[in-house]
Image (cartoon, rainbow, N blue to C red):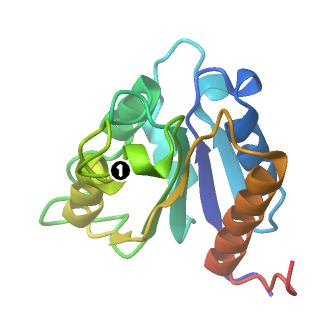
Amino acid sequence: MMTNPVLFVLAHPDLTSSRANKALAAAGTGVPGVTTLDLYSEYPDLFVDGFAEKRRIAPACAIVIQMPIFWYGGPGLLKEWMDRTFTAGWAYGPDDRKVAGKSLLLSMTTASDSGAWSPTGIHGAPVIEYMKPFQQFAAFCGMTWLEPLVFYAARTASKAALDAHAKTLAARLAELTGEQTNGQ
């Protein structure tokens, strides 16, 4: 039985062109209790309505962000969404912290394989090191930081690997909502 609504934020500027993000978006959108927000479809003018987003976030127990890693961070509209929505006096501050206690989960894709994200790899550090701003954002707002999901080699991974990762994402979302996956 679903007890906790989850907001699933898709942050890809061209979701239809991304094999991996499109598949992961479909997997997450199909989970009962999950509300999906496709930022680039919702805000084609790239201007986020922070008040509307606060209303969308209010009932959620968790926010799950599906995104590609672009230059060691998320796509630009994701930052705009965060800037316009998670404001002082609402998300943080001494008087009101409306997102405190909610969970934050990043689900990321990267074209590089896992070896590239190591001290000896081309990127020089594990991918999680580059996500520190998101982790600090969660801490600053009183949110619970969850271990991110990373799909490596997104452009070259097999369909079987992508399908398995999509099932993992769907299971994590179901777990957050309180739904039982019955081994699926």
- In the depicted structure, whether residue 17 falls above or below residue 86: above
The image shows residue 19 at horizontal and vertical percentages of 75, 33
The image shows residue 37 at horizontal and vertical percentages of 64, 42
Q: Quadrant of the N terminus?
A: bottom right
Camera-nearest residue between 55 and 60:
60
What residue lies at 37% left-to-right and 29% top-to-bottom?
A: 80
What residue lies at 15% left-to-right and 60% top-to-bottom?
A: 93
Is 46 left or right of 138, judged from the image as shown? right
Q: How many marks?
A: 1
- In the depicted structure, whether residue 176 falls above or below residue 129: below
User: Badge 1 local density, few (<14 within 10 Å), some, or many (20+)?
Assistant: many
Q: Quadrant of the C terminus?
A: bottom right
Which quadrant of the view contains residue 74?
Answer: top left
Q: Amino acid at mark 1?
A: Val
Dot 1: element: helix
What residue lies at 69% left-to-right and 48% top-to-bottom?
A: 36
The image shows residue 34 at horizontal and vertical percentages of 72, 61
Residue occupied by mark 1: 127
Is 113 left or right of 155, judged from the image as shown? left
